[in-house]
Each structure stands twice: as structure tokens, then as C-alpha cells.
Image (cartoon, rainbow, N blue to C red):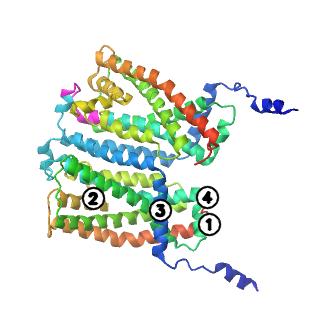
Amino acid sequence: MNRLEILQLFRDEERRSKSGLRQLSAVVWAQLKMMLAYKSWLVMDLLSTFASVVMYYFVGLQVDPLRLSQSGWGTSYLAFSLVGVATSNYLWACLTRLSHSIQHEIRGGTLETIAVTPVNMLVFFIGLTARGYLVSLIYLVGVFTVGVYGLGANLSFNPQSFLIFIVLFMLMLVSNQALGLIAAGIIMVYKRGDPLVFILAAVNEFLAGVLYPLELLKRFPAVQFLSMLFPYTYALDGMRRVLILSASMPDVNVLTDIVVLAVFSLILVPIGLKTLEWGYGRIRREGTTSSY
Amino acid sequence: MNVEEIVKYMAENIPRGGVGAIQKALAFIVRDFKIWWTYKLWITLDILSSLTFVATYYFVSMIITPQALINAGYAADYLTFSVIGISLQHYVFTSVSSLSDAIREEQWNGTMETILSSTTSFRVFLLGESAFRFIIGSYFLLASLGMGVLLGIRLVLNPGSIIAASVLTILLVASHMVIGVLGAAMILKLKQGDPIVWAFSWLTQLFSGVLYPLGLLPDWLKWVGNAFPLTYSLDGLRRCLMNGEGFDSPMIMENTLKLMLFIMVVLPFSLWFFKKAYDSTRREGALGQY
């Protein structure tokens, strides 16, 4: 066997996947098992969900309904904050979960182990986000249930509004997860980028107006402009229009939100996938899949 | 050498003297500060992220009426009320939770077993670990209050209110160090999902009057807040900083005495609880496990 043949042998890629779905379900199942291993954490998380809704109920008691309605969002601060609080957990999951999980795997030395198995790494990375999505789903359902049935928030849930809400919600997930992919790709290479992602999520949450009407930003045009650069702003605006103002199709504002979110998704998803691929390729080449 | 002699030899307690407890605690602080200082970008971004809370409540204050604050005896200024509330809650929560995180970090890196098998006692270990978290946390507290001042919060400062606020702040730190020790004990046993820190976070947010005066809570819920030192600290500090009250105010005195009582009752219990968890983890040989 000559030198070239030996090199070729080492270069040979094993076929990484026979069934992506099976691999995905295995990764998701592993994540779920880890999550369920910490039962006390789950219980506390559920209780804190309840607490956060009740807290905004009491904050709402201090809100002047006239000033809120002047912003165009009805008179109930509970309903207004409920949509923001319920969905903002998904924003954090989309932006931070993957990069955090990859860092965790690198630190634990398990990313290298998985990389040498015939697992499709893209499937593995998608599977890693499952835990964050599931926790956020529990949070979302919990917040809406406590808010609507426990505290009497007046939100419009009918088949049409639910359908539009789902469309906006899915577009919010796709566009923000694309940002999460970009962050994960960069953090994989530079290792200590977690705070960058956290500040991105915190600033995004602030600029999207999770707890206050964006109309108040009119006094600060630069801040208002910045808020328009994030997909979550449009998603939250659309979801509030549907659930609080009962906007139905074809509502121009909701349609605009959907179109803007679709454009964000179309641009950001390919960039996100490419960045993730670049990051993973680079740490493999540099041999830093288990260094932190 | 017979068996008894070997057992005696192995059981011999190495004297723990030599370097004093304060010196060791200072060494912990210097060590943690050196590690912390290597992440300058992290620090800057962390501060920025905490400032977004203050900015958020600046806008929320624009749609709020101050009537509930007036009824509770505070100055009619929701921005100042909320900035003091979230800054202090964030300060004590990050300090308390970062103590648990530090224990996890030591376990994760395998350094906890190394430190505790040296002549350093667990009390000194706890003091050193927690002191640094509270010192660093005050950096964020000052940043949040500074941001609040820029956004227009109104603090009423006079010699009396400054002295009372300083005493209350010391008691706030001491009382929450005690809670941090309880959380650290839980993390030793459970490894993840420290219920003490979680419960502390959501219960104080809900019942300590961080974002609203406690008068808004129904009577049957008000008592829950009495279990937390943050409730007394917030009420006392708000009266000092918003109303300019000092120790001549009966409310300030009452809050001070309640905080002192909390520390005297809970400190021995939390140390005992940590010792129990520590001994049990050592017996199981799980000190370095994560």
C-alpha cells in the first residue's frame, strides 16, 4: 500500500446516516432522559412559570388602562404582558440553547465521541435544541393556561386566530433559530461567546417590547429603529394583534408581519446553516472538539 | 506496627491551623477575582444585559399610576421604586445562585475534592466562595442604580438615610449569604436544579414586593413575604432612599430588627445543614461527582 492509498483510507468518510429521523429521535430521547433525571428542577420550573404570570397580574393592577389603550393594545396589561412573557422563553431557547448545549458537550468531552460515530452531526445539533423547545412549550402552555383560565386574561382563541398565531409562531421559531445557528457556529470556534448570545437575547427581548408597548419608543427614534432589526419584534406584534385585538385575515398589519418574518427566515436560515457547518468544520480541522 | 496503631495513624486529625481563616478567605477572593477578570468581555456584556431590565421598567413606568405606592407610604415614583426593587433582587439572586454555580464549577473541574482534602475547612471554603460573589454582585448593583439615575430616578439622600441604608445593605448581604449556603448544600446533594435558589427566585419576585407594593396582594398571601429577608430589606431601603427616612423611623427600626433576627435564627441552621450534606456526600464519595 503506497502513501496515497493510506491517505485515501484515512480520508474515507463513513456514511453517517441511514435514517436521520431515527437518529434525531435518539438524540431527542437522550435529551429528554437527562431532563427527566432532574425532577426537582422540573417542578421548580413549573412553579416559577406560575409565579411569573401572577407577578405580571399584580404589576397590571398598577397600570393605567387609559395610557395602555392610547398605545392601541386594549385596557388589560395582563393580556398584553401574557403574550410577551409566554413567547419570550422560546426566543431565549432559539438563540441560546444550541450554543450552550454544544459548549456543554465540548466541555464534557462528548462532542468528540459523538463526532467519531456514524451520527449525522446536523441531526445531532437539531436534536440538542429539543430540550429547550420542550421546556419552552411547557412554559408557553402553562403561562397561557394560568393567565387565561386562572387570572381571566381576555385573549382571543378561536380556530382562525389560533391558525394565524401558529403561522406567526412557526416563523418566529425559524427566524430566531437561524440566529441561534449563527451564534452556535461562532461560539464553537471561539469557545467563550455565551455572554454575547445572552446579551443578544436580553436586548432583543427589551427592544421587542415584551413588557411595554413599542409605541412608547417613538420618543427615541434610534432605539425604535434598532427594534425593527429583530424578527421577534414582528412576531410579537403579529401575535398580539391576533390574540388581543382579534385581528383576522386579511389584516394588513398581520400580513406585513408574516411577510417580514418570512423574508428574515429566507435570508437567515442558509446563513445559519453555513455558519454552523463552518464552525464545526473548523474545530474538527483544528482538533479542538474537546478543548474549552 | 499493629492494626490499632495503623487505624490511629490514619484517623489522626491534621491540625487545621497555620494560615488564618481570613487570610484563606482573602485568598479565595483573589483567586476568583483573577479568574473573573480574564473574562472582561463577559463582564461588560453581563452588566449590559442587567441594564436592559432597568431600561424595560423605565418604559413600563410610563403607563403606571403611582396610587398604590402612595397608599404603601412610598414617594409617588414608580421608576425609582422598580429600579431599587429589580437591582436588589437581581443582586441577591445572582449572588446566591452564583454560589451554587461555583460549587458546581468546583465539582465539575474536580477542584472541590482537592480543596476540601487540604487543611481548609468547609466554613472557610464557603466564606471565601460567597464573599467574592457578593462583592462582584455589588458591581452590577451600582451599575443598575447608576443607569437608573441616568434615566431619572430620584433618591433622597441625607446623613440619616445614608447610615440606615448602609446598615440595611450589610444586613441584606449577610442574610442572603445564609440562603446561599443552604443552596450550596442542596447542590452538593442534587448536583443540578438547586430548589432553594429557584424557590428563592420566584417566591421573592412574587411576594417580596420587587415590582409592586405588598399592599396589592390579598391578605391571605401577604404572610408569605414575611419569610424572606428581601422583603424587609426592600421596604427598609426604599424608605431610606425614596423617602429619606433614617433610624428615627419606626419602620426602619422594625425592618432592621427583623433582618437581625433572621440571621441569628437561620445562620446556625444553614451551617448545620451544609455540614450534613457535606458529610453525607463525603461518605458516598460523591464530592467530585457531577
Query: Which stretch did the figure color magenta?
Result: B71-83
- Tell me which chain the residue with mark 1 is part of: A
Mark with earlier residue (1, 4): 1
Place of residue A261 in the rendered image (x, y in percent of width and height, measured from the top left):
28, 67
Same-chain status of marks 2 and 4: yes
- Tell me which chain the residue with mark 3 is part of: A
Amino acid beneath label 1: Glu
Label 4 crowd (10 A; few <14 / some 14-19 / many >=20): few
Label 2 crowd (10 A; few <14 / some 14-19 / many >=20): many
Mark with earlier residue (1, 2): 2
Camera-nearest label, 1 or 3: 3
The outermost residue toward the top is B248
Q: In front: A265, or A78?
A: A78
Residue that badge 1 annotates: A286
Residue A263 in magenta stretch? no
How far apart are the two marked residues, 1 and 2, measured between alpha carbons? 38 Å
Q: On residue A184, which mark appears?
A: 3
